Image (cartoon, rainbow, N blue to C red):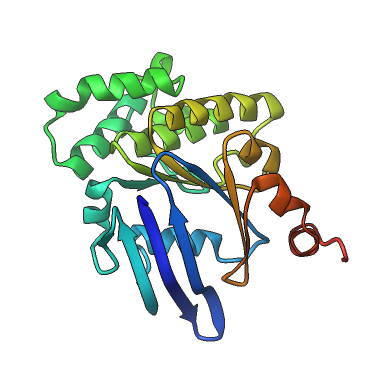
Amino acid sequence: MILQLERLSKAFGSVVVADNIDLQVEAGSALGIIGPNGAGKTSLFNLITGALKPDAGVIRLDGRDITDTQSQMRARAGVARSFQIPRPFANLTVFENLLVGATHVRARPESEVVDLCGTILEQTGLFRLANRAAGTLTLLERKRLELARALATEPRVLLLDEIAGGLTEHECNDLVATIRDVRGGGVTVVWIEHVVHALFAVVDRLLVLNFGRKIAEGDPRAVFASAEVREIYLGIEV
């Protein structure tokens, strides 16, 4: 298993965002995470990346305990994420945004990562915009840049947080194709998403959270069809 969570817990006073969560993610797999707003999905990513410190439990990467490891070291070990709201360096070009991630996280000189950044720009459909200021991009282009910046750190585990939100159907399909290509390259994907059809096009397993608790996990369509999940996620009374 490339990523393991063991009885992971976190609360802010009476608000529980992670309640004894156990999770195992195989290398090369794609896990989808759904749940209503406030279910603890983004908090789970914050715990995995080190932005939050758990109250209890263990986080393992390739079997190694990284629970107390700093965020920078987790990134260097291969954990990268995107954010719900893209926040690129607006005054830098698209290419420069990738260079920042590639050089800062991996502590490599620019000369060693130029080709890598060019390849990622091609992969994410941003090559023609390489010299464009990031602040001038459309929503889809900013979403693609958010993905590209994460890929520039050469991740082994890629955490995507609602990256399809706000896109048109056509834009969403294009983004899904890119994410499937990334996964095909051997990157493990963990994807939080409300656009369920996009999620189902990529993931092979689905996790449902509610109030920080794991409600269900397994085959995406079987999990989504369960009465409990419909009641929690869709508001359909069982």
How many marks the image carries: the answer is 0
The x and y percentages for residue 200 are 65, 39
Residue lying furthest bottom: 14
The x and y percentages for residue 79 are 33, 48
The x and y percentages for residue 174 are 59, 24
The x and y percentages for residue 192 are 56, 50
**Quarter-of-image position of residue 209:** bottom right
Residue 138 seen in the current view: no
In screen coordinates, is 90 left or right of 15? left
* Quarter of the figure with the C terminus: bottom right
Eyeballing the image, is 91 above or below 64? above
**Quarter-of-image position of residue 103:** top left
Residue lying furthest right: 237
Front one among 213 and 114? 213
Residue 208 seen in the current view: yes
| Residue for point 38% across, 79% down | 56
In screen coordinates, is 66 left or right of 126? left
Eyeballing the image, is 162 above or below 171? below
Eyeballing the image, is 131 above or below 82? above
Front one among 26 and 207? 26
| Residue for point 25% across, 31% down | 99
